[in-house]
Amino acid sequence: MSVALRDWKSGRPHLHPRWRWVSAALFVFAALALLGQFLVYVHYSASLLRFPFDYDQGEGFELYDAVLHAQGQWPYQDSQVFPFYSSIYPPLFHLLVVPLIWIFGAQMWTGRLVSFIASLIAAGAIGWGVQRASGNKVIALLSGLTFLASNYTFHIGPLFRQHMTMVMFEALAIVALAQLDDPEPNDKALWSGLVFVLCAGYTKQLALATALAAFGFLFLRGPRRAVLTGVGLTLVAGGIFLWINLATEGWWYTSIIRANINAYDAGQAVSLYQQWASLHLVIATVAAARLVYEIYFTRLSAYAVWFAFAAANGALSGKFGAGEAYFVTATAAACVFSGVALARLWEWSRNKSGRWATAAALAIPLLYLAQTYLTLHLYTEGPIYEPVARALGVSGARGYYDSQGYTQLGPRPTRADHAAGTQIAELARAAPGPVFSEEAGFMFVAGKPVVTNAFPQLVMYQAGLFDPAQEIEMINRKAFGLVIFRAQFYPPPVLQAIGANYQPKREIWMNGFLYRLLEPRP
């Protein structure tokens, strides 16, 4: 912590030596607490890298998207014909995984590794943004670690999902564009920021809010440049969109746009806002206070605009199928913006009286400690974790404590989970013909073709974009040797047809969920 001591000592003539040491100790304590949470994150990620099946429902279909890209095929297909498959996500994340699939084959760890690395890069971008804006390396470090300590980052970061890669590109975009406020801005910052915005949008559609924030910031700095760059980026993004739509005979537009217009539940959005605010109360409050300050006393920074747009974008979490992932961008924005705010507070206090200097020197590390406590998540079993959990007075089901409460993500897969997945895969391998499975991970282990993509099928059916007639026809003639259910996220007519033609064969618990296996009725 020599860097911390240097930053802490600089410009502190009015701070009593006793309070200097107390402040330094608190900063060290905050850094160690956040580092401990990071090590738990690494342990969790490593356990998922070793798990070859779906941990979060739908990961296997993300892998299949990447496999199709690796084979030179588009995953945006007519899902009304066999194998009844289509993807509803843009391709960039899957394309990043393709080189690993070419080398190692269709392995679940490939996309999980890319997502984990993306979370580290996003945290690095947050820290870099704070340091560039303030010069404070200690608070920059704490800001990046706070992002990795978030329950949402912990749950989603190491999954075979495109979301964390989107957040990485978003963070890199805003940090790059923030350089336009430098005394000598350069065009590299502008163009790299725009490229990152484009990459974020072609990773996941939710990045639209960051794109709006980026151009809102550019408009505040120069309307003419904002309009010109906006038109240019729109032409590039639109050209790519039209090319893919032409190559997929229109299924790209159907899958990416029309299938993502889902039913909306305002109560779900309010509940998720409350959860996010309670877990990230400290950084969200500091960021909101800094936003008010910039509105009234200075000009809006890139981080202020990003935080406002990202927080507002959380309203989309009310969509059917949405969840906590919709707030990861808001968490990243809050981490970098609150870090800048606290670093500026530290700088301001350097030239104030001893009382103000002391208050800032003690309050800033205490705020990071409080934020770390709010997002505490910890394993409670094992020679290392059990004493720590006992000292903190926490316990939880399945050997895992999470301040968020119950969550299906977070507990490490056990040996029993590995054995259960292997058992299901072996039953799928032994079944005659294709297998109708709600999770594709089993199919890769069993060497079976991937058939259906449950959730996209359901939302497309709800939107009137999916006719299950051919699928039901195959079910009625019992063309599938086995059916594997977890949540039964299929259109009601499909579930009814399966109920009429298939009977229970086995029930197996894995990762805290009951998997129901059905075989054809005699």
Image (cartoon, grey):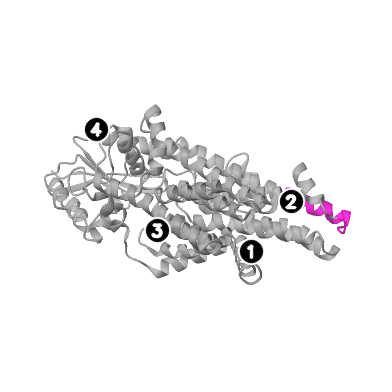
Q: CA distance from mark 1 to mark 4?
A: 57 Å
Residue 479 in the image, given as x and y percentages of width and height: 15, 41
Left or right of 221 on screen, residue 16: right
Picture layout, residue 98 above or below residue 243:
above
Instruction: Decide: few, some or many residues near mark 4? Use Cα within 10 Å; few <14, some 14-19, many ≥20.
Output: few
Instruction: Decide: few, some or many residues near mark 1? Use Cα within 10 Å; few <14, some 14-19, many ≥20.
Output: some
Between marks 2 and 4 in the image, the one whose residue lies nearer the viewer:
2
Q: CA distance from mark 4 to mark 3?
A: 35 Å
Amino acid type, callout 2: Phe
Badge 3 is on which residue?
Answer: 322
Q: Which residues are magenta?
A: 13-28
User: Looking at the image, is mark 2 or mark 3 earlier in the sequence?
Assistant: 2
Amino acid type, callout 4: Ala
Left or right of 143 on screen, residue 4: right
Residue 357 in the image, given as x and y percentages of width and height: 81, 61
Badge 2 is on which residue?
Answer: 27
Residue 27 within the magenta-colored segment of the rendering: yes
Residue occupying the point 83% across, 65% down: 355
